[in-house]
Image: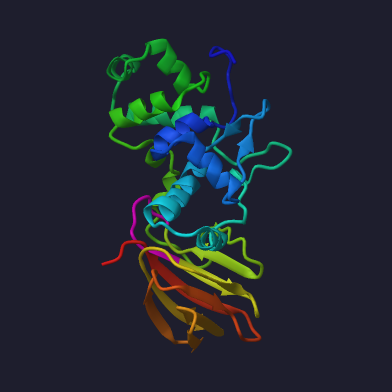
Amino acid sequence: MSNTTEINTPLYFSINEVAQILGVVPATIRNWEKQGYFVAQRSANSYRIYSLDDIELLKKIKQYSIDDRMGSKAIKSLLASQVATPPTLSGFEAAGTSNQPDRKLIGSKWRQYRDNQKLTLEDVARQVGISISYLSKIENGQANISYNILERLASFYGKSVLHFFEPEEAQRHLIEHDTGEPIQAGIPGVTLKSLISQKEHVLFPVMFYVEPGAGAPETHQHNGEEFIYVVQGQFRVTLNHTEVYNMKAGDAMYFKSSDFHSWTNPGKKVSQVLWVHCPVER
């Protein structure tokens, strides 16, 4: 594909580039797919391709499987509480649609960042080690760009690649009533809404809306700490297979994420539950 033709298409990386980002070998990523943790997108010539959001999901899979040494069943259960199982990366559909930012949009962000720092094309190109014309094409969405170049640009601006491409609206301090971003749970009868919109944070507060009989009955565990507060309805949490806690509105609960846990709504009405996860254990 020519670098002189405008490429207003989503930005994707090869499996080799993603392996470099994650610090694993490509065979590891392929093995994760074989185990059913995700379904990779494919390009027109059937090569695996990955977006920035895909990389975020794969980073979680790496944490669960390599860092936390969780078993396959536990990993699938945990992923099921966050995305559809098995997740198709970026929600890629047969028609080839995607909600990923395209190269033109990404290029405009690079240009805005450079302008904010009052830098010229020559200033940045010289420091990054690319030609002025190539940088100009990148900023105008008219050039193919590899992860290596993205990393060099992000490093020049003092940012990581993934951090750089997060949306500006992710800096909201106030989440007004019913404006939290929906989270794809992949669990029938369960709706989630994020209660935080920051680029850097430790706590993950989420509002759960659980239909009667719905939940995550398969036990799972991971790193961190959990806090639950039942806003309305009933909620049942089972710890370590035998400890059953039946909660009602106004009840609160705390436990280590390393405890095996599962949950469900045993009542006849929708339960609303504030769930706060801190992935770092004190």
Please provide percent x and percent y for residue 205.
Answer: 42, 66
Q: Quadrant of the C terminus?
A: bottom left
Q: Can residue 52 be seen from the camera position used here?
A: no
Q: Identify which residue is drawn at 52% across, 30% down.
A: 14
194 sits to left or right of 34: left
Please provide percent x and percent y for residue 171.
Answer: 38, 51
Q: Quadrant of the N terminus?
A: top right
123 sits to left or right of 251: left
Up the image or down, 163 lies above or below 212; here it is above
Scheme by which the image is coloured:
rainbow
Please provide percent x and percent y for residue 162.
Answer: 41, 40
Q: Give the extent of the magenta segment.
A: 197-205
Query: Which of the two residues, 196 or 254, is positioned nearer the viewer here?
Result: 254
160 sits to left or right of 59: left
Q: Identify which residue is drawn at 66% across, 67% down.
A: 188
- The image shows a total of numbered marks equal to 0
Please provide percent x and percent y for residue 192.
Answer: 55, 65
- Name which quarter of the figure residue 135 lies in: top left
Up the image or down, 130 lies above or below 91; here it is above
Up the image or down, 218 lies above or below 8; here it is below
Up the image or down, 101 lies above or below 274; here it is above
- Name which quarter of the figure residue 187 lies in: bottom right
Q: Identify which residue is drawn at 65% across, 42% down.
A: 92
